Image (tube, helix red, strand yellow):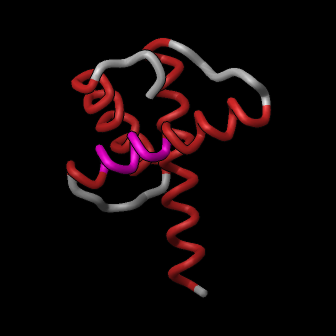
Amino acid sequence: MEGLGWIAAIIVGALAGWIAEKIMKADHGLLTNIILGIIGAVVLNFLLITILGATLGGWIGQLIIGIIGACLLIAGYRAIRRA
């Protein structure tokens, strides 16, 4: 997560993972939510920087990026599991 320290990244990642869990109607634990939020944010930040050359900054921006990224990861996992 761009511009956030480790503790802030964990907090924002946990919150993003929890919100994504509620949006996608999934059932995960706290550790999975943290991992989904952080990895989702890292992946989506990479894609945004590669495609657009920029990403959202600050806590709120990274929370939004983390939520969208975690939702994409959950959807991808579900698609792979069905196949």
Where residue 3 appears, as percent x and y from the top left, is: 44, 16
Question: Residue 17, located in which quarter of the rendered image?
Answer: top left
Main SS of the magenta part reads helix
Magenta stretch, residue numbers = 33-40
Where residue 1 appears, as percent x and y from the top left, is: 44, 28
- Indicate whether residue 34 is drawn in magenta: yes
**Relative vertical location of residue 70 with respect to residue 52 in this rendering, above or below:** below
Question: Residue 8, located in which quarter of the rendered image?
Answer: top left
- Which is more toward the observer, 35 or 74? 35
Picture quarter with the C terminus: bottom right
**Relative vertical location of residue 7 with respect to residue 28 in this rendering, above or below:** above
Q: In this view, does 60 lie to the left or right of 76?
A: left
Please give the name of the residue rendered at 40% of the width and 36% of the height, measured from the top-left corner: 16
- Which is more toward the observer, 20 or 53? 53
Q: Residue at the right extreme?
A: 52
How many numbered marks are there?
A: 0
Please give the name of the residue rendered at 31% of the width and 61% of the height, measured from the top-left corner: 27
**Relative vertical location of residue 45 with respect to residue 60 in this rendering, above or below:** below
Q: In this view, does 41 lie to the left or right of 49?
A: left
Where residue 64 appears, as percent x and y from the top left, is: 53, 28
Please give the name of the residue rendered at 67% of the width and 40% of the height, measured from the top-left corner: 47
Q: In this view, does 63 lie to the left or right of 17?
A: right
Where residue 59 appears, as percent x and y from the top left, is: 42, 16
Please give the name of the residue rendered at 29% of the width and 44% of the height, measured from the top-left corner: 34
- Indicate whether residue 9 is drawn in magenta: no
